[in-house]
Image: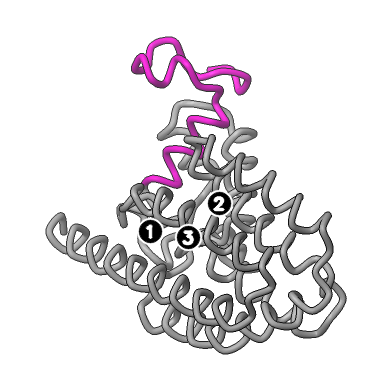
Amino acid sequence: MSSASASASGSSGRRRLTAYQYAIETLRTEILQGKLKAGDRLRQDDLARRLDMSTTPVREALRTLVSEGLVFFDVHRGAVVRGLTIDDVNELYHLRKTLEPMMAEQAMATLREEDIAHAEALHLEMVATTDVVKWTELNQAFHAALWASQDNSRLAHLIKTLRDASGPYIALSLYMRPVHVDVSNKEHQKMLDEYRARDIAATRRHTVDHLDATLHIIIKAIEQTEAEAAAQS
């Protein structure tokens, strides 16, 4: 099959996708469902045969999965599925709940009107989109816009590292519980109102509440994925 488009002999859903789109959606779903488990090697040749396509779109899909944090490259083993664990996400969110309220307070002191305007525009895009991957990218950009005046601080770099590491967990939670998107959109509107009002106390409190709610959903999603994987084994 050509790497430019999916095989016409596949399902009707597949016929509407390019080979890359089919590869990324299939592999992402299998990882999030637990069909591909932590530590599993993802060999390009094997995947290309299974998905009935050339290795080029598979290679592109693996690069995307690396950028999303669902896969990492090991110098000896190649592409490997990254593990998502409750202990890891608890640690990530404990650190975020400590640092992000500090960032919110610092950013609010130097907040510019263009930062709020940019965040509001991103929020409208988030409300309008039905693409979970795009929503996740917009979510990162939304928070970065509110904190743009603190871009060069050490705190900003620490938080970016933690938020990037949280990406796969957010993807899992949205895949397992899509309703979380609507809940988060409403919380983001409240957050915008608090930033515009320069309400530091409310923003610090809401930042922690928002992270707690997300962590709860992520843990439930991990537990559900583990239970489903165990039932299939």
Q: Quadrant of the C terminus?
A: bottom left
- The amino acid sitting under disc 1 is Ser
Q: Residue at x 53, y 84 (%)?
A: 97
Label 1 belongs to which residue?
A: 173
**Could you say which is closer to the camera, residue 71 or residue 111?**
111
Tag 1 or tag 2, which sits nearer the N-term?
Answer: 2
Instruction: Tell me: residue 115, above or below residue 57.
Output: below
Span of residues in magenta: 1-29
On residue 136, the disc is: 2
**Could you say which is closer to the camera, residue 105 or residue 31?**
105
Residue count near mark 1 (Cα–Cα under 10 Å), binned few <14, some 14–19, many ≥20:
many
- The amino acid sitting under disc 3 is Glu
Tag 3 or tag 2, which sits nearer the N-term?
Answer: 2
Count up the numbered dots. 3
Locate residue 95 relative to residue 50 in the image: left or right.
right
Cα distance in 3D space between marks 2 and 3: 15 Å
Verify whether residue 13 appears in magenta.
yes
Q: Locate residue 215, reporting x and y percent.
A: 39, 73
Colouring rule applied to residues:
one colour
Q: Residue at x 43, y 70 (%)?
A: 83
